[in-house]
Amino acid sequence: MDKYFDIKNKVLEYANNDENIKAIIAIGSSTRAYMKADEFSDLDLFIITSNTEEWFCGDYPKLLGTINISFIEDTLGGGRERRCIYDDDKDVDMIILTPEQFEKAVADGVAEWVMNRGYDVLYDSNGYTELLKTHIKPGSSEPAINEEEFINIVNDFYFHNIWACKKLKRGELWSAKTCVDSYLKNYLLRMMELYRYKIAGVDVWHAGRFVEKWAGDDIVNDLKMCFAHYDKEDIMRALVATHKLFARITVALAEHEGFEYPEQAKICAGKYIGVF
């Protein structure tokens, strides 16, 4: 049984009795044909309303159930998202947008990446069903990069190899580990997505979702060495492993795309951290 059944019914009850609510649209794993929802999945909803504050400062979220955790963050389309844990583990993410914000996000393509793998219109009083059919096409991620951006990212990555190593030598473990396991990993992930999509034609997911399924065995095995304990030697080991993996896939990607490769940057960083 759908553990979110009661919450969805309550949301729809409000929609039917509140003229401010124009649409309720489910997205995410509950609507996907591939990588379907499991026992750990959340409920993702677009709530399109002319009275957004009712969902941020009013009583609506509380009426859906017992809230144990709740916070608000910025989201797509210039809107905000309320994220709640109901009961023990019912994770409900509500993207609250005005009709104008939602229509613009759909028309401009901003909503495409969260809707193109599936959505379900639960309530619609504004004719959004046809709008979505026009603008949201089923598909997968199609990462892209131009040569200028590629070269800039590669240089940025190697620059911060040296930066992180200096922090380690100074004994600033927090700064070094944050750089190695966060800053550099964001660039590594971007290049992994491009590499697997461009060279292997694989369907990749945003933000590292399901990376173990799409990255390939060789990359997944290398990743095991790319993250560090809070320890100087281990952070250094992870930095070297991250450098090697990044260099391997970006050199291959540059060759595949016909991009110039900043080889001197790779050599400079490699020498400093002890790869060469």
Image (cartoon, rainbow, N blue to C red):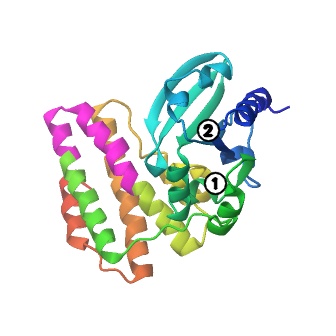
Which residue occupies 63% across, 55% down?
Answer: 115
User: Where, quadrant-wise, is the N terminus in this rendering?
Assistant: top right
Which residue occupies 43% across, 48% down?
Answer: 78
Q: Does 60 sit above or below residue 110?
A: above
Label for residue 182?
Answer: none
Which residue is more in the foreground, 154 or 266? 154
| Magenta extent | 164-187
Left or right: 189 as drawn, with respect to 200: left
Label for residue 213?
Answer: 1
Left or right: 258 as drawn, with respect to 68: left
Secondary structure of the residue carrying tag 2 is loop
Foreground label between 1 and 2: 2
Magenta span: chief secondary structure: helix
Q: Can see residue 220?
A: no
Magenta stretch: residue 173 in it?
A: yes
Secondary structure of the residue carrying tag 1 is helix
Q: Residues within 10 Å of mark 2 (few under 14, many from 20)?
A: some
- Relative image position of residue 158 (x, y in whole percent): 25, 59
